[in-house]
Amino acid sequence: MSKLCSCTKCKKKKQVNEFYLRANGKPREICKSCWSSINKEYYIENSDKIRTNRSKYYSENKEEESLKMKKYYESNKESFLEYSAKRRATKRNSCPSWLSPKHRSEIKSLYKMAKNITEKTGNIHHVDHIVPLTNEFVCGLHVPWNLQILPASENLSKHNKFIVEDMVCSSEKSEVLKGIK
Ligand SMILES: [Zn+2]
């Protein structure tokens, strides 16, 4: 049981259970942690391609996929509803009451534009909050000047990784946060 295998990538000797097994039951040459870092690198380098392939696959298998999604949704309904309610509440709380109807329609048209770009290019685009709505240090606003359209891959890789030092100066920061232009 305690037989050691050496990984050809990190050159370390590890227990057999640190390796994924081949179909024939023999361990692979590369250990689990090296595998996952290889996969991660591959994913980061090819995330656009992977996403395009995925959306292509989706459009070619629309009916099956939407059925699958429906089933998945039905069996995970509560967590979906909870997530979207939370998301809506965050947006609502971040959407200041003094926002003019013009600003509100600007926000709507940005979401529409992202949808149009997605349909035209086949590359999923999201509306992104420049200053995230939820972050450890800052909370952005759901206002037109805090929104930008980004390809999904960029948006997701950004996550909530927002560094306060990114803002040029603190007065500018408070302007963005208060939404005063
Ligand atoms: Zn390794």
Image (cartoon, rainbow, N blue to C red):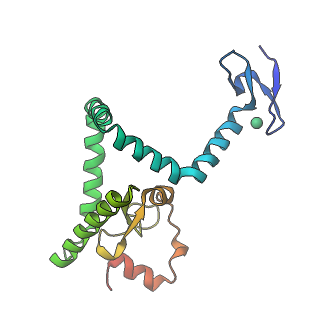
Which residue is more in the foreground, 139 or 68?
68
Q: Quadrant of residue 122?
A: bottom left
The residue positioned farthest toward the front in the image shown: 60
The answer to whether residue 109 is left or right of residue 179 is left
The answer to whether residue 140 is left or right of residue 33 is left
The answer to whether residue 72 is left or right of residue 161 is left
Residue 135: % across, % down: 44, 61
Q: Residue at x 53, y 68 (%)?
A: 163
Q: Quadrant of residue 112?
A: bottom left
Residue 165: % across, % down: 55, 74
The residue positioned farthest toward the left in the image shown: 101
Q: Is residue 58 above or below residue 112?
A: above
Which residue is more in the foreground, 98 or 48?
48
Q: Residue at x 36, y 73 (%)?
A: 146
Total count of labels: 0
Residue 149: % across, % down: 38, 67
Which residue is more in the foreground, 67 or 100?
67
Q: Is residue 4 above or below residue 8?
A: above
Q: Is residue 111 above or below residue 175?
A: above
Q: Residue at x 46, y 66 (%)?
A: 137
Q: Quadrant of ligand 1?
A: top right
Q: Which quarter of the figure is the N terminus placed in? A: top right
Q: Is residue 145 above or below residue 39?
A: below
The answer to whether residue 62 is left or right of residue 21 is left
Q: Quadrant of residue 6?
A: top right
Q: Which quarter of the figure is the C terminus placed in? A: bottom left
